[in-house]
Image (cartoon, helix red, strand yellow):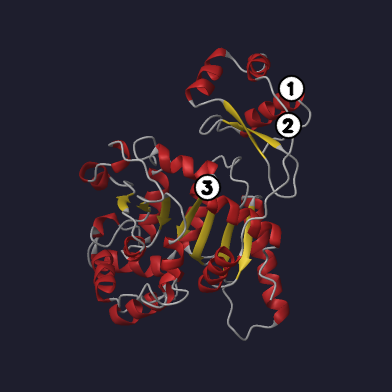
Amino acid sequence: MDTGLNERDWNLLLKRIADGKCTPFIGPAINHAYLPTRRALATSWANEFGYPLENGDLARVAQYLAVENHRYFPHDEMQKQIEAAQKPDFNTPNQPHAILADLPLPIFITTNYDNLMLDALAQHQKEPRRELCRWNPYLLRSHPSLLESGYQPTPANPLVYYLHGHSESPESLVLTEDDYLDFLVNISSNEYNLPPRIQQSLTDSSLLFIGYRPGDWDFRVLFRGLVAAAQGGLRRISVTVQVPPLPDDAAEPTKEKVQEYYGKYIDLTDRQMRVYWGTAEQFIAELGQRRQGATPTPHAAVAVPTIDLLRLQSNLSDTFNLQELQQMTQYDLRIDYETFPDTKPAFILHLVTYMQRRGRLYELAEVCQRERPHVQWL
């Protein structure tokens, strides 16, 4: 079966992982062996609590429970589900969390509410830290940020960032429809904005979405509201692992049509995103096998051309005003040289959080190309 990733995609992804320049987003499908699926849980709650409408959407059913009972009733029910879940054996071959925990990465972002990723990292002799996204007033008051206290995530001391909260703090969970809307609105404001280190991981590392379905709320909020809004010019490649929302007995033309539709949707949002068509378990197993079986092929040495950074800054001053140039300096204007498999050498201009307006990015690209024709804007 064609999964959608070619050898070049895999090689580039493995290189980014080896360089520590990949940020996994871990979704609920990775937990199917230990917890009910979102759809199964929605059906269970709908039957148990008398939900009168179509019951396939967990956020909608949770919204009903919050209205009919109290604000945090579904959050408390979710906490009970996680506390009752069976614990995985991280020594089992192809155990998904264990394979991810073996990756030499500093940050793991999850929309799950459990400890499984933390436990897997600890099992691999790492010292993980946990941080909750402070997306509501309660979290802003009660949960100081580790990243503001001088802690810097490393592969040996990684951070697991709980974007949608943790079960030990039910008030932190993004679960109901209102929660998702409030989350999306709040993290767009300065008061609740993501920590700079997390924002940086969205812009300068490859993103790896594992365990999401394209139509679910958590993926849509992440993909459209968070990732698409970040300037991702330095990501090189990102991958989303998707299972089309189809029954197993769907006709092949129907499967192809659905894959084509979701592929176009993702491509329109982020042209650097590649889609792996398969389950989270299939992707993670292949990832583990490729990491164990492949040794990077050394590339021939390439003569590194030079570029005059001061002259480039002078040329930039012809396009951007003084205040904008000061902002560039504040956000670390520098140039790195890097080679990529099967491509020409390329310079990377780092402006990590600068210039949110797309038009100014195009102007900057033109300045770089005038300075030296073979400079590539990524």
Q: Establish if 101 lies above or below 331.
A: below
Q: From the image, tell me which residue sits under label 1.
A: 371
The reply, left or right, for residue 1 in relation to residue 86 is: right
Q: Residues within 10 Å of mark 2 (few under 14, many from 20)?
A: many
Q: Quadrant of residue 35?
A: bottom left
Q: Amino acid at mark 1?
A: Glu
The reply, left or right, for residue 370 in relation to residue 53 is: right
Q: CA distance from mark 3 to mark 2?
A: 22 Å
Q: CA distance from mark 1 to mark 3?
A: 28 Å
Q: Amino acid at mark 2?
A: Val
Q: Establish if 172 lies above or below 290.
A: above
Mark 3 residue element: loop
- Pointer 3 or 2: first along the chain: 3
Q: Quadrant of residue 80?
A: bottom left
Is label 1 in contact with label 2 (beta carbons under 8 Å)?
A: yes
Residue 98 position in % (x across, y down): 41, 67
The reply, left or right, for residue 195 in relation to residue 80 is: right
Q: Establish if 41 lies above or below 274.
A: below
Q: From the image, tell me which residue sits under label 3.
A: 21
Q: From the image, tell me which residue sits under label 2.
A: 375
Q: Name the residue rendered at 74%, 38% in the picture.
A: 302
